């Protein structure tokens, strides 16, 4: 079992920056990928960043160049640095982990609000 705990959400002005974090605990010996998703009110979740076991990353066009995913050396903590934030980035941001065995885990989410 893996537990994921997000932190760092909050209110930020348009054009500002925010970093959210996700700490993974439990059976984290074999992680295939860690990702950040977001969910707008009433919408399905969309992936905004992924980092794979080899260190590669991927982003959708909507955030590429503004968002950066990274992880610590132990590989158990993943960060999402969000720059040039827009009101349309307002959402609940969820951490996701996929283990090497294919098991999937989700955090409970952290709210990011971009507003003046």
Image: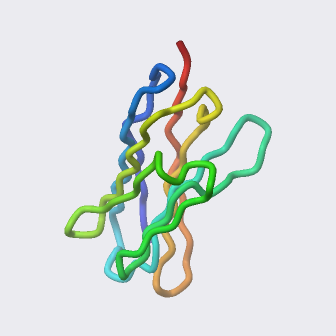
Could you say where residue 3 lies in the image, as x and y percent from the top left?
42, 60
The residue shown at (73%, 34%) is 41
State the count of labels: 0
Who is closer to the viewer here, 24 or 44?
A: 44
Who is closer to the viewer here, 99 or 52?
A: 52
Could you say where residue 83 lies in the image, as x and y percent from the top left?
42, 38
Q: Quadrant of the N terminus?
A: bottom left
Could you say where residue 17 lies in the image, as x and y percent from the top left?
39, 32
Who is closer to the viewer here, 99 or 65?
A: 65
- Which residue appears farthest toward the bottom when viewing the image? 101
101 relative to 56, above or below:
below
Whether residue 49 sits left or right of residue 72 in the image: it is right
Q: Quadrant of residue 18?
A: top left
- Which residue appears farthest toward the front when viewing the image? 65
The residue shown at (47%, 79%) is 99
Whether residue 49 sits left or right of residue 70 in the image: it is right
48 relative to 15, above or below:
below
- Check the image and tell me how it is coloured: rainbow
- Which residue appears farthest toward the left when viewing the image? 73
The residue shown at (43%, 41%) is 82
Q: Quadrant of residue 90?
A: top right
The residue shown at (41%, 53%) is 68
- Which residue appears farthest toward the top when viewing the image? 116
């Amino acid at each position: 079992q893996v537990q994921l705990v997000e932190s760092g959400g909050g209110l930020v002005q348009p054009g500002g920056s925010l970093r959210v974090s996700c700490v993974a605990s439990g059976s984290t010996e074999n992680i295939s990928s860690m990702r950040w998703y977001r969910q707008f009110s009433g919408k399905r979740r969309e992936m905004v960043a992924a980092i794979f076991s080899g260190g590669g990353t991927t982003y959708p066009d909507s955030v590429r160049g503004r968002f950066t995913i990274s992880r610590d050396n132990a590989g158990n903590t993943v960060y999402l640095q969000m720059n040039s934030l827009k009101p349309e980035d307002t959402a609940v941001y969820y951490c996701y982990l996929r283990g090497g065995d294919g098991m999937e885990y989700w955090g409970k989410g952290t709210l990011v609000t971009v507003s003046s």
